[in-house]
Amino acid sequence: MTFVLKVSGPADILAMVPELVGFTPRNSVVLIAFRGKRTCGALRFDLPSLESRTTHKRLASFVVGMVCKLPDVDAIIPVICTDDEFAGGTAIPRREFAELLGRRIELSGFELRDSLCYAADGWASYLDSAVAEGGHPLSEIAESSAAAAIPERLKRSSVGEIEQGRVPDAAPATAKRVQKQLANFRRIYERMMREDPNHDRPDPAEFEPLSDIPLFVEEALTWDDGAIAANGALLLFALQGPPLRDHVMLQWATSLAVGDRMWRDFEQEGSSDPAADAELGDLMLGIGSRPDPARIERGIELLLTLVSRVSGVDRLAPLCMLGWLNWALGRGTLAGRHIEEARAIQPDYGMAVVLDTMFSNGLMPEWAFRP
């Protein structure tokens, strides 16, 4: 469901930034795009260093060029989020880059609706002729009408360690329990493969929920805390295999019907539909119809919980899934951070290498640029 939020001033705009980009950005440039009076997207990029004016020009041209891909945009508000401070003065941090960016926005035919600085100790508009000493207090953002109107279910935290490229760890007792469950599933599987390599016997009772994998992972989108505690380790165990990892990711982005078809084609080798396979391949690359954002959000929420409860190589598959699912929602920064964590664990992990290549080349899903 679309959430409509009315804003009445710059503090409201700044309060919206975490909701628009998916996390609280630091040392970033955020371009908020408008169609008329409504926002239609936000793009985040790393804030360039102070030294290189050439880099500033290139980045300004690049980021405004990305906004040009969004249809029917007529206005932009750039927000410079920086750890720099006013330090009690009236000089706004990063003014030179903000003015360069503002000129590029106007030269490209967009209205520069405002230009805002969100510094470590205050905020201000670069368009104001007079700036108060120290800027406006940050409390005006936290106490703004927009901040108060955002439902709790939509509010983003600063995402702590995610900003630094790592999903936070769960409580040690929870993590220990899940690790023991995973170890047990591995022992059962190894014994099963050793004693019954041709699968002539029924699967062990512990694997019974996997008898209908598409249904199992579909129901996972509605699990409460108790169901996650009971079944989360089994899902993590199942996701370690590349085919299932990819199938689950795409099913969560689309539907149970797609999951059923993918699993049927996988089990009955040679029975797949080439056209349907091509459609799923295009989906992986961001081509075609927009996936279901509500389903993706539920998948992300579940995966964050599961990843927090494991460590090392057990994080690889769900981290890559988190990367692609966030990318599918247009959250390139979070997507890249998850892939960075995966490659820090295992640099040559296949899916992480592929996604890293996609993201590093600036590939964004086509649907991110459509209404």
Image: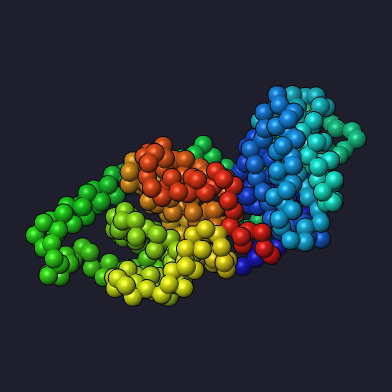
Percent position of residue 246, x then y: 40, 59
Q: Is residue 359 left or right of residue 264?
A: right
Q: Nearer the viewer, residue 264 or 186?
A: 264
Residue at 70%, 43% (x, y): give it: 62
> In which image quadrant can residue 114 be found?
top right
Residue at 77%, 33% (x, y): give it: 97
Q: Is residue 66 left or right of residue 323?
A: right
Colouring used for the render: rainbow
Q: Is residue 207 left or right of residue 339?
A: left
Residue at 74%, 61% (x, y): give it: 71
Percent position of residue 116, x then y: 77, 41
> In which image quadrant can residue 149 be found?
bottom right
Percent position of residue 225, x then y: 39, 58
**Taking the image as drawn, is residue 326 in sight?**
yes
Q: Quadrant of the C terminus?
A: bottom right
In the image, residue 140 above or below residue 205:
above
Percent position of residue 235, x then y: 32, 59
Q: Is residue 338 left or right of residue 5?
A: left
**Taking the image as drawn, is residue 112 in sight?**
no
Q: Quadrant of the N terminus?
A: bottom right
Residue at 43%, 72% (x, y): give it: 274
Q: Nearer the viewer, residue 270 or 47?
A: 270
Q: How many numbered marks, from 0 up?
A: 0
Query: Quick one: which residue is furthest to the left in this view?
Result: 195
